[in-house]
Image: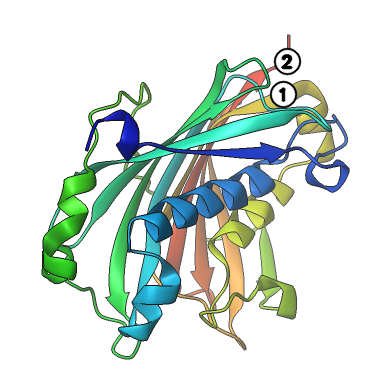
């Protein structure tokens, strides 16, 4: 299989309900479309959720890092490319490129995934699934952004405490990974997004949040444009950490 054949390319459109008040695609919608592209790519290669669920397995997103120079405007078509960079015993690295209507890269993403057993919730050895076929899809296409960093938050006073609600839940019965992104961006005043754009956004997922839990959000301000965020369920156990880096609008 050629390197080109290992790259999945999928078209999307920035629908009116996908954009924010600036007219640009929201990061939450972009995150969902990246996951859709990852799902299409995995399915076409025999590692889709539908097949894995029959084997009591599923994919779990562990880390995500995005860097954006621009995002599509309302009604604009865009393309997401995705490919597998590395496969380890318990994790795999998947990368993304977002191309605008002119085919120019406007965003890149790096992600780390684990496969778990849906009954035990324990990690699965990737090389033991389908005879290790996943390693055959490793691609050496460049992804020119840094890998997800290690995030530490020291704050002990939550800036928001939110109960888990219906719209937070996904098919696995826990809070959807993209909902954390939306909640974290909602922590910042609206004026922030009138003056700045998100340049880099990172998520590190640690544990699951279930129904009846509450999500407490803690922020460390590194500087005026750099913030570290931690989400703790029931104000105790860490469930995810995030880094948000802003850049002033031109």
Q: Which residue is mark 1?
A: 196
Residue positioned 42% across, 50% down in the render: 41
In the image, residue 205 lies at what x, y percent? 41, 60
Query: Residue 242, labelled with which disc?
Result: none
Q: Is residue 186 visible?
A: yes
Q: Which type of secondary structure does the marked residue at label 2 adopt?
A: loop
In the image, residue 68 lies at what x, y percent? 57, 26
Residue 190 as seen in the image, left or right of residue 49: right
Task: Between residue 128 and residue 115, name the one nearer to us.
Answer: 128
Q: Which type of secondary structure does the marked residue at label 1 adopt?
A: strand
Task: Between residue 8 and residue 232, name the one nearer to us.
Answer: 8
Q: CA distance from mark 1 to mark 2?
A: 5 Å
Q: Which residue is mark 2?
A: 249
Indicate whether 106 appears above or below 215.
Answer: above
Q: Is residue 87 visible?
A: no
Label located before the other in sequence (1 or 2): 1
Residue 119 as seen in the image, left or right of residue 39: left
Number of numbered callouts drawn: 2
Mark 1–mark 2 CB contact (< 8 Å): yes
In the image, residue 137 lies at what x, y percent? 23, 45
């Amino acid at each position: 299989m050629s390197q080109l054949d290992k790259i999945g390319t999928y078209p999307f459109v920035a629908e009116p309900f996908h954009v924010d008040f600036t007219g640009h695609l929201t990061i939450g919608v972009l995150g969902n479309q990246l996951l859709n592209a990852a799902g299409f790519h995995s399915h076409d290669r025999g590692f889709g959720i539908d097949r894995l669920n029959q084997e009591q397995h599923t994919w779990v997103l562990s880390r995500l890092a995005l860097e954006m120079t621009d995002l599509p405007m309302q009604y604009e078509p865009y393309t997401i490319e995705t490919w597998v960079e590395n496969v380890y015993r318990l994790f795999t690295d998947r990368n993304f490129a977002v191309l605008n209507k002119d085919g120019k890269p406007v965003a890149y993403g790096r992600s780390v995934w684990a496969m778990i057993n849906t009954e035990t919730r324990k990690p699965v050895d990737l090389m033991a699934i389908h005879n290790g076929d996943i390693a055959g899809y490793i691609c050496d296409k460049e992804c020119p952004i840094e890998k997800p960093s290690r995030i530490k938050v020291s704050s002990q006073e939550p800036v928001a405490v939110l109960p888990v609600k219906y719209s937070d839940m996904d098919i696995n019965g826990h809070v959807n990974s993209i909902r954390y992104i939306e909640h974290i961006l909602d922590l910042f005043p609206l004026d922030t997004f009138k003056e700045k754009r998100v340049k880099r956004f990172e998520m590190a997922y640690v544990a699951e949040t279930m129904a009846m839990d509450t999500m407490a959000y803690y922020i460390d301000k590194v500087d005026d444009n750099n913030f570290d965020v931690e989400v703790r369920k029931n104000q105790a156990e860490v469930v995810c950490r995030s880094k948000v880096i802003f850049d002033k609008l031109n």
